Amino acid sequence: MATAAVALQDAESPLVQRRKTRTNFQLARHRFMQQKLAVFGLVIVVLFIACAVFAPLIAPSSYDQANLLDANKFPSRQFPFGTDTIGHDMVSRVIYGIRTSLIVAFSAVGMACLIGMPMGLAAGLKGGWLDFLVLRLVEIMTALPGILFAIFLMSVINSGALASVLPRNQIFNVALVIAVTSWVPLCRLMRAQILTLREQEYVTAARSIGATEYRVAITHLLPNAIPPMIIALTLGIPAAIFAEAGLSFIGIGINEPVPSLGKMVSDSRQYIQLYWHLGLFPSLAIALAVLGFAFLGDGLRDALDPRQI
Amino acid sequence: MAAIPLERTHSRMSEKTSLGDLLRLMPEDDPRTFSRRKVLSTAAAGAAAAYFGGSMIHGVSAQDATPGAAMTPPDDAAPPEKQAFYQATDVSVAKAMDFYEAVYERAGNVADLFSEPLIRIDRNFQLIPAGAESWSGSEDGKTWTFKIREGNVWSDGNPVTAADWVKTFQYGADPAHAWDFTWFFQGVIVGWNDAIAGKIKPEELGVSVGANDYELVINTEVPAPYIPAMMLYSQTLSKAALETSGPLYNSKVETSVTSGPFKLQEWTPDQQVVIVTNPDYKGTQPTLITKLVAKLASPDAYFTMYQGNEIDFYEGPDPASLTLMLNDDSTKGQVYSGVGDFPTWYIFFDVTIDPWKDLKVRQAWSHAIDRDTLKTKVLGPNGTPAYSWLAPGFPASQREALQGIQNFDPATAKDLLSQAGFPDGKGFPKQQMWLRAPSPLDKTVAGALAAMIKENLNIDVELLEQDQKTFTDALNAKPTQIPLGYVRYGMDYLDPSNMLSVWKSGGRHSWSNPEFDKELADASAYLGDPAERIKMFQAAEKILVEDVPAVFVYHGTIAQFIKPWVKGEFIAPDDNGVVALHWPGVAGMSTVLSEMYISSDAPDRS
């Protein structure tokens, strides 16, 4: 009786009650909120996403509105970031540039997911010749230098050789190229996850009661493989932002007049000795976006790591 | 022709200047621009007299050059081993060394120096005998005979004869070669059109060896008094080298063959091309310069290279570089502005497809471009507003007379677009405007054009940057693959027939106008009064401007940066006072190289 009474007393203590009522999500959120850099990253990401979504509402003017008579103005009350060589308001260009970067980054990562995740899932689950095929493809893609392959693909697209296949939307094309050159890590991660998870007891149990392979994959394996994938996706976004900026920097990415942060930095090089503001603000925007997503990804990784539960 | 040291005329800019100030300070009354205008009276009259006068048909009395003349170096000249001239060439373009291999993909600054053209021009645009020592035309103006200078030899020991030119023209017309400049001789040389279409063999072309090995005969479809001027582009290939080593034989040191003033020493892909004096040269263009180096780089890097003394010269700088140069007392004297090749930059349409079929749409675009603001805020000394095709100073130019046809008038532009069924731009498809390997200046101008079209017509225009080859192939394709583009064209020789022939049916663009074709053909073949001929060309140009196959944006008055240690007569004022490195620059077709030397204060870049 005494033992039972002690047990009851422990169960009613505030500590025990808190442990009982916290879900995994709450624990993860708690751990996430304790990381200052992660919170900082989250704030930046939220701000940037807000910028992208509400760009038409918050930008002083449209991205393609320019007045040559206002060209090359330094930052002032009228133009807080100054104007460029054609007379675009740099605040508007930076805001829309962020929008372009995020659209490309999210689209690229999304498309990379669509390519890499099913392949990794199938390879890990089926094994055999399918696994062999996927692994060889992964090895081929790994052997190709990503940025050079992306430049090659963009050059082919820009030459019009694929005009009958691809849409005339350069943002989509850039995202597609980044996705084609960046799906490999996602595929390998997914395959590794599946290889680990498929040996778990609950999977064996599911199989033993007659679950089909499809049901096992969708109901048991995929949901448990998602958390590491979310981290990988989050960390893939800054890489995609950099890739888009890089392609635009060398002149084969987004076409004018659609603003791209990378292109704005590239164009500013000619004027760096005269108009410092042309390169500063887009560079800051790229740096903040990349830092924000990187901090957020790191924070999520630490928060979702099951070993910390 | 000895080089003479010369005091160079410096820019009139003396105080610190912002970009805006600079551009305002470069109006039409700029002394250099004024000089450019003066070219009209002299050059046009001179050209007309030289090209089309009766004497031209029967013989030549042009200034002669002495083959193999020795050069006397000025006192301040650097020693021969340091007579090296450094330039930059677009790395994406440099694929060939010869005009008849690929006009738009040759390493421009060091190409065309491995043989002599039949004719070259001096800085006053006067024809000078080069590979040909004289020429004459038949009474009907359809048979042209060039007497090839004897004594020139190829580095493989073969003499330079008329057969080399015959083979070169046949190679240019060979459809298997797919030369990118075939349009130039279309409708001119007998059989050219059929040869490039594969209907006849190139050997059946109307170019042949005459009475002996040193007589070249060119037969033309129509009376062509401009043939001698066209022969500026006649840098011959070696017949023997073509037959033994095949095309592009000048791209490798081991197969390269030259009869020009220079020979290939090095071609390191994506880095540099080096050519050095040909010790066996016996032609008419002796030089003090012993080495020409073309650094292969992106145009974006030219200014940095110039600042770092890696190159001695470049032209067409972006506005920021220009401002920096002019704001610095130590560099403003290195800035020049010349007439170049009288180029015109223009937006062109594929008028065979919608929405460009509709004249009102094209007219709307032509009225939506504010060229004066473009001049003030972007171009500065790099250009002057264009409302028609022929640049001021070029024979038959009539900019003022035609200015009202494509003038800036946004209200009219909107009205025309509305009449075409696109009120306030609604329903007008988003456009992609192709750019050909754009320079930083081109990108800025194209961006400004897109902004003006958006502002005045509410039409979205995306800029599509293409490399030289992709653009050229798409442009030359029949039917053209470029619905909308922005490009330039400059003269090949100082005659309206050349500039206007860009627009003849089956030429560079898809626009076709029988009335224009007839006016152009009649004027080109006209052997009578030169003044009457000019009027005929002006009538053709008026048709062109009114039918708006293109929106003419600006005429280039090319700004140049030249290092102070690059000296010589080439930079002396021409007959009209223009002080610049004259078109076609450092090339076999001009006298620039013979008039240039490097002074002893040049930095050591060996």
Image (cartoon, coloured by chain):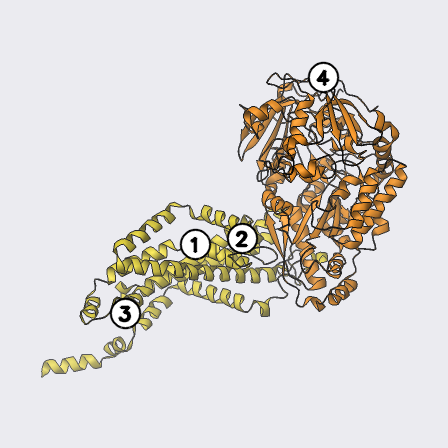
Chain colours: A yellow, B orange
The answer to which of B365 and A68 lies nearer the viewer is B365
Instruction: Check disc 4 and give the amino acid type.
Output: Glu
Q: Quadrant of residue B133?
A: top right
Ranked by sequence position, the earlier of labels 1 and 2 is: 1
The location of residue A84, given as percent across then percent down, is 64, 55
The nearer-to-camera label among 3 and 4 is 4
Q: On residue A253, which mark appears?
A: 2
Cα distance, mark 3 to mark 1? 29 Å
Residue at mark 4 shares a chain with residue at mark 1 = no
The location of residue B186, given as percent across then percent down, is 71, 39
Cα distance, mark 1 to mark 2? 15 Å
| Circle 2 SS class | loop
For label 3, the residue is A215
Which corner quadrant holds the N terminus of chain B? top right
Residue at mark 3 shares a chain with residue at mark 1 = yes
Q: On residue A180, which mark appears?
A: 1
Which chain is disc 2 placed on?
A
Instruction: Check disc 2 and give the amino acid type.
Output: Gly
Ranked by sequence position, the earlier of labels 3 and 2 is: 3
